[in-house]
Image (cartoon, rainbow, N blue to C red):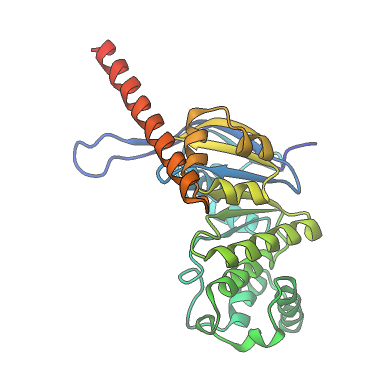
Amino acid sequence: MTALLDIEDLEVVYPGKGFGRKPFQALKGVSLDIRPGETLGLVGESGSGKTTLGRAVLGLAPVTGGSIRFRDEEISQLSRRRRRELSSEIQVVFQDPYSSLNPAMSVGQILSEPLTARGTPRAEARGRIRELLGQVNLPADAIDRLPREFSGGQRQRIAIARALALDPRLIVCDEPVSALDLSTQARVLDLFIEIQERTGVAYLFISHDLAVVRHVSHRVAVMYRGEIVETGDGGQVTAAPEHPYTRRLMLAAPVPDPQRQALRRTERQRMLAAEREAAGATEAGAA
């Protein structure tokens, strides 16, 4: 199957902050692809570069090398006009459901913004908004209410509805459940799966949590210090990881058994100490 999104040898370099500071290379030759209707889970710790990759796909990070092709079109250096046009096909759901919605606007106004920008007639837009609310399992009367009247999980459902408004082919999901409690996370993740089965939308699903990624992803890519270190079938990568960094991520995930949790913590600390020792030996050899 032809890839919907194809990223090859992508590099992102940020200029140094302050006089004399060296540029920072956030992405180093990253290559991956997403097929139509597929979820690719992108997992890594804070600072690994995973959010930068999502921002590059959205045109929000400076691409300094490589390519990003969406439906066979190079999109890494688009004009502002073409990027706005592309927003109907590539959408985003951000991490924080509390700050991603305008508190002064009703839910109906929030959901009508992308439709109005596309020129959808008012009556048709209102019908579409009611349809979107139904898709994310929110009551029809939500259309006239403000975001503050909803829980965190409900607000994230509103954000998902906004992303779906223009029938996109790809949604970049940047830590979309990390601000939610565990029970709400599960319901929102199930909603993502349900929407994908119904619409065929593809997801680039960014998270630091292997358990979350395992729940929703067909394939998983693991990012460490700006590079992809492991990729493969979601079940295989999250159950039997090959790279030491992926194994560390798996050990970092909490488990309900205190004894198992203590053993996992000890093993993770042992792996970290071994990595530091190996890095120190490499630096000594280079000197």
Whether residue 8 is visible? no
Instruction: Give above or below for 110 relative to 168.
Output: below
Residue 6 in percent (x, y) is at 65, 37
Using the rendered view, name the quadrant where residue 117 is placed.
Answer: bottom right
Residue 88 in percent (x, y) is at 67, 60
Residue 253 in percent (x, y) is at 50, 47
Assign the C terminus to one quadrant of the image: top left
Whether residue 148 is visible? yes
Q: Is residue 139 left or right of residue 267?
A: right
Q: Is residue 71 left or right of residue 105?
A: right
Farthest residue to the front: give it: 259
**Count of numbered labels shown in the rendering:** 0
Q: Residue at x 73, y 54 (%)?
A: 201
Q: Nearer the viewer, residue 248 or 23?
A: 248
Q: Residue at x 53, y 82 (%)?
A: 105
Residue 224 in percent (x, y) is at 46, 35
Q: Is residue 233 left or right of residue 147?
A: right
Q: Residue at x 48, y 80 (%)?
A: 103
Assign the N terminus to one quadrant of the image: top right
Instruction: Give above or below for 285 relative to 150.
Output: above
Q: Residue at x 49, y 50 (%)?
A: 254
Instruction: Give above or below for 124 relative to 50.
Output: below
Q: Nearer the viewer, residue 262 or 59?
A: 262
